[in-house]
Image: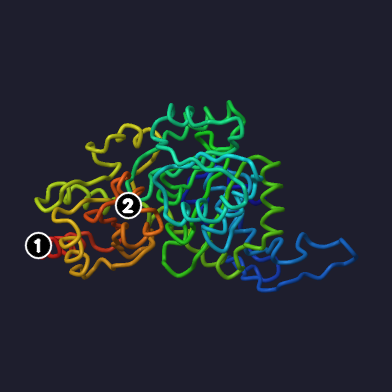
Amino acid sequence: MKADWNQKEFGFETRAIHAGQKPDPTTGAIMTPIYLSSTFVQESPGVHKGYEYSRTSNPTRKAYEDCLANLESGKFGFAFTSGCAASTTALHLLKAGDHVIASDDMYGGSFRLMDKVIRHNGIEFSFVDLTSVEAFKSAIRPNTKMVWIETPTNPTMKLVDIKRTAQAARAKNILSLVDNTFMSPYFQRPLELGADIVLHSTTKYINGHSDIVGGALIVNDQELANKLAFLSNSMGGACSAFDAFVSMRSLKTLALRMRQHDQNGRAIAEFLSKNAKVERVVYPGLPSHPQHALAKEQMHGFGGMITFYIKGGLPAARMFLESVRVFSLAESLGGVESLIEHPAIMTHASVPPENRKALGIDDGMIRLSVGVENLEDLLRDLTQALDKA
């Protein structure tokens, strides 16, 4: 009898390799095949083997969705062509006149989607500092239907108390969605803390190799799952079979990669915090982080995302960014290779300047996505670049 891979019986690493997947019944192939078929033959009208059309459901995508849902302690997973496609689908759970409370600090693409696109559909948004549960409660209106949480936030690395915010939301019949991209299910599982929906840009740590773009939503509630299945099928943003296969392959090494990201991230955060050319380091794993206690409470590790402020403003930041050799100057994050970027010019350019200033996204801010390379190589690279800055 094949195991059902429940989390009480099997560890994360085991489930990442096996959950949602069975050997191919025809050949015995241990890897789920890439089912590139767009349609599936029916024995009689409406009588089929569970699949009709690949936009609706695909065997490769289903295996990947089931595995990812299992790792997030969820029951239902939905894979999309991008994180933005997943976000767009989630926001279509709402209707004109509804109100969303969202993190004031978030991925620039999420802000752009809400402020420049979905807002025109008649949905209202308030961008609030969700590090305070009381601030969230104060922002609730009679028409508030969703709270959109990023934690840690991108790029200032603020933390939101998932459990207490989700409890406050549920008391008012407000859906709570958590963007868990920065932590992955290895280090943080929002559904276990009471959230209703988990969002991922699977482009990042889930896939982890910078070779596909994808997104995902995971839920536990059957009614919510039914709505998302309808929206996914109707809006057409479903992940391709090939991208699902690649991402499912990557899940098998997620635990190994996240441990190394975390190990390198902690060491580099410590190194930067002691460097005379660095003004400030923001990393949940450092005791200097104002919410370090919360990080230890709701996270199982601190990951590889670090934000720091270099002394000397834009000239120093530009020289530093142009001088790195192992780190690559590029947008995105979560790949095995180390990336470095300037949020004010790159990932958060779509955020209005006054908003960036209020959040502390200034010309001296630099964001690191620490990869899994040799730690000494990374430290040596940062040292020589800081010396030039």
Between discs 1 and 2, the one toward the N terminus = 2
Query: What residue is rendered at 57% in x and 59% in y?
Result: 85
Q: Which mark is residue 305?
A: 2
Percent x, y for residue 196?
58, 39
Question: Could you say whether the residue bearing mark 1 is in a helix, strand or loop?
Answer: helix
Q: For marks 1 and 2, give the one nearer the viewer.
A: 1
Task: Please state which amino acid type lies under the numbered disc 1.
Answer: Asp
Name the side, left or right, on which 315 lies relative to 307.
Answer: left
Coloring scheme used:
rainbow
Percent x, y for residue 334?
38, 58
Q: Is residue 186 above or below residue 130?
A: below
Name the side, left or right, on which 183 lies relative to 388.
Answer: right
Percent x, y for residue 36?
66, 73
Q: Nearer the viewer, residue 270 or 101?
A: 101
> Which quadrant is home to the C terminus?
bottom left
* Residue corresponding to mark 1: 387
Neighbour tally class for label 1: few under 14, some 14-19, many 20 plus, Cα within 10 Å: few
Task: Please state which amino acid type lies under the numbered disc 2.
Answer: Met
Q: Nearer the viewer, residue 36 or 172?
A: 172
